[in-house]
Amino acid sequence: MNKKVLGIIGGVGPLATMLLGEMIVKRTKAQTDQQHVNMAITNNTSIPDRTTYILDRSKANPVPVMISDAAKLRSIGAEVLAIPCNTAHSFYQEIQEGADMHVLHMINETAKRAAQTGSKKVGILATTGTLTTSVYQLACQHAGVQPIVPDEETQEMVMSVIYDDVKAGRPVDFLKWQQIINKFDELGCDRIILGCTELSIVKKELNLDDMYIDSMMVLAESAILACGYELKD
């Protein structure tokens, strides 16, 4: 398979963008610099907040900015596009139609990964925007997995971890995190999907185990394979 250049629409958020790049490098089977994935990355922190727009369509629309960034990446050779933001995939069809290249769908790939683990009931940790559009719920159902979403009180804690802790550059409130996970345990979830790229940072910070399916790692591995490279054993 011919090697392809990967484009990454970053800045959504900035730390998650850097973590995706690191994951791709670490998961690629390579022994020299030249054997790694060629990547072009934007880190456009001015992209409007995705959840804010989903909950209030009078707010700034992030889609035109992301399509513009895709065009910039295409102009410098990108052939496959990755977006390290689950919520942005609520607009996947619009972005795919506006981007002159294949756009990886991290949510569909993550749902497939959940099914491959043999899980029957999977908890979804994601932004309120992502849950509102049901993009994860539908993907899981299509993959044959029962999605479990948090109640309103638990979802407020999830959003606090994402926005008040990770995006704000603060350490994760472990007590708050444990309360969230306890709720999913009570509901009998086999595994939990980290369906927000900020939660991939939580996984790294708290050294979470394989009960958690990391959507960002799924995206990283999908990007490596889509660009014609091999995964490290």
Image (spheres, grey):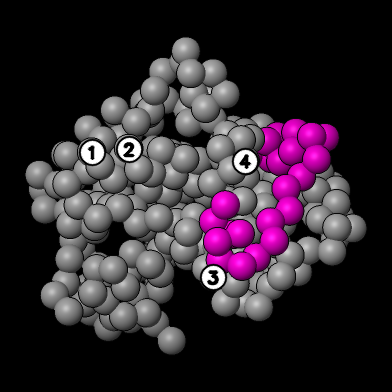
Alpha carbons under labels 1 and 3: distance apart: 27 Å
Q: Looking at the picture, which amino acid does disc 1 mark?
A: Gly
Is residue 161 magenta-colored?
yes
Q: Residue at x 54, y 18 (%)?
A: 56
Q: Looking at the picture, which amino acid does disc 3 mark?
A: Arg
Q: What residue sits right under mark 1 in the picture?
A: 98
Could one spot residue 53 in this view of the protein? yes
**Location of residue 153 (image quadrant):** top right
Q: Residue at x 66, y 32 (%)?
A: 164
Quadrant holding the C terminus:
bottom left
Q: Is residue 152 left or right of residue 126?
A: right
Give whichever of discs 2 and 4 has the lower sequence position: 2
Q: What residue sits right under mark 4 in the picture?
A: 131
Image position, residue 212 (x, y; %) = 66, 65
Q: Which residues are magenta?
A: 138-162
Q: What residue sits right under mark 3 in the picture?
A: 113
**Location of residue 184 (image quadrant):** bottom right
Question: Is label 1 in a helix, a strand or a loop?
Answer: helix
Question: Is label 3 in a helix, a strand or a loop?
Answer: helix
Q: Which mark is residue 137?
A: none
Q: What residue sits right under mark 2 in the picture?
A: 94
